[in-house]
Image (tube, coloured by chain):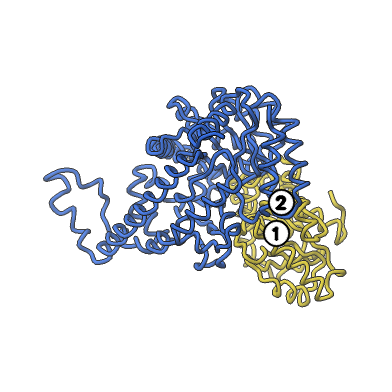
Amino acid sequence: MGKKRLIDLMADLKEGEVYALVEELINSGTDPLKILDDARSAMEIVGKRFETEEYFIPDLVLAGEILKVISDRVKPFLKTEDDLQKKGKVLIGTVAGDIHDIGKDIVTFMLDVGGFEVLDLGINVPVPVFVEKIKEFQPRVVGLSGFLTLAFDSMKKTVEAIEEAGLRDQIKIMIGGGQMDDEVRKYARADAYGKDAAAAVNLCKQWIGGQAS
Amino acid sequence: MKTPEELYQQREKRVQDAIALRVPDRVPILVLFAFFPAKYCGMTIQELMYDPEKIFQAEWKTMIDFEPDMDNNPFGIRLLGPLLETLDFKPLKWPGHGVAANHTYQYIEGEYMKAEEYDHFLLDPTDFMIRRFWPRIMGGLSGLQQLPPLHNIISYYLGMPMGFRGFTQPEVKEALETLVKAGEKSLEIAAYSMRFSKEAREAGFPMQYGALCQAPFDTLTDFFRGMKGAMLDLYRRPEKVIQACEKLLPFMIEMALNGTRASGNPRVFIPIHWGLDNFMSREQFNRFFWPTLRDLMVTLIHEGLNPCPLWEGNCTTRLETIKDIPAGKACYAFEATDMVKAKEILGGTVCIRGNVPLSIIATGTPDQVRACCKKLIDTVAQGGGYIMDTSTGLDDAKPENVKALIDFTREYGVY
């Protein structure tokens, strides 16, 4: 009871009704883990709708808010932090000199919801920090984000430093954001350019495993 | 050899012909040099943002060397350093204040108006701005939050007798002093701006734009609500969003009209930020973004002006919608929109502009640039109604690529 209803309501972004139903489910003793699972299933539908251009940024932002509210509401009832099997590690950051974060945050969110373990280094990430964190975190994919043309050279330098550190063969590098395109991908010698968050998720699925949709 | 005045007239006519959908003598060439002049003239961006003489020289040399059909007055939007410092302006990082000397200034997103403040904004936007918004985004004006609502000071017994007490507070006095200092900086910017336009005219270069304003939805999102706030508002308080856009609309019209009156130049620059394909659905665009932008553009057109939006990102799915304005009056610059489709749909209605990717201008070769320009001229410039330009403003461009774009179009773009 209520299971399908929660998934549907959340996937359709009926915010008020979702919260009311979650209260109802908690009060009737539903396993909080199940509520979270349903929320995740709903997020998968949201992700698919984003990919097929039925949903856009406002819808994604609202879905993220709903997920956050449900998680915060349900967490106190969880005995242990559930250890969901993550698909693989992705390191992400906005390159040196650029302080834009909106696109990067959306990609991070979509990857997280898509089941990847994401380490977000934030904005204006110096080249050596990328190298150091790759060594530490051992990601399979590195995502370089940038909005301005000044990011072209920062991306190039970051990839070069990764090459010099001997780490290039163990990772795939994707770029995205503002002025980026396939020309910049070539210039920076990255493996792929993704035009939006759905493209980034698909690249990670291709590279790390799982089925790209 | 043409005189500067003849060149001025020829260039002005070339662009006006393109906007009016007449066939000009050749494809007009306009470029937003942005911070490119710094790199080109061996100066840092920091120097350009602080030193009016340097920004003047750098923009001037770039204009003379590359010779586009029109230039862009750099003062209103680039000589910001001293003013930003005076005001302790917070939503921007600029060279020496959060970014390196050679990096462009960058805006910091924020919810500078809270969701629960919509009603205050709608009641009296100016009061909200002076007493809540300005103190929040400008440290130098934080004292203004201590003022009472000024709209309550009405006449000799209504609000006046005790109404001015707030102005004696030390923090308010400090803020008022800051305003006077900011006023001095504004005067300096205005003086240089007028000098630049005047001297450019004497040298034969019209200015691209005589005023600037924004789509009301962009103003609301960029400066007041921030991305996250505005996107959630579309669901949580859609009516307030529409009301706020309607409230901002006359301000945007006024800003454009005042600017064009002062400059005597009919072209109004309107950078478009949040209406793009990937940012909102077509329904959301049609409901929240387009109505007030259309009202803005149509009003300007009725005033005899030329609205010139720069549609950033990809707006291909918007083309059918944005076609709905009076023909031959506006110019739409496109960053990543499909230009062939744009020509197909907008061809008889709006002049289109731009689209040479900055990635090629910054990292490619002159041959690549020429190939790109050739393709644009061969396809979308046919029959007029097209202006050559890069996808958006130049910062990190290779000079030889900028030269290739301009020189090639000058020769190959003759009708």
Q: Which residue is mark 2?
A: B359
Residue A152: which numbered mark, if any?
Answer: 1
Picture coordinates of residue B176, whole percent (x, y):
27, 59
Element type at mark 1:
helix
Looking at the picture, does residue B329 appear above or below residue A150? above
Element type at mark 2:
helix
Front-lying residue, B179 or B410: B410
Q: Colour of chain B?
A: blue
Which of the 4 image quarters holds residue A52?
Answer: top right
The reply to whether callout 2 and callout 1 are in contact (CB within 8 Å) is: yes
Please check whether the numbered discs 2 and 1 fall on a single chain.
Answer: no
Left or right: B276 with respect to B308?
Answer: right
Q: Colour of chain A?
A: yellow
Front-lying residue, B100 or B40: B40
Amino acid under disc 1: Phe
Picture coordinates of residue B148, whole percent (x, y):
26, 54
Picture coordinates of residue B388, whole percent (x, y):
65, 37
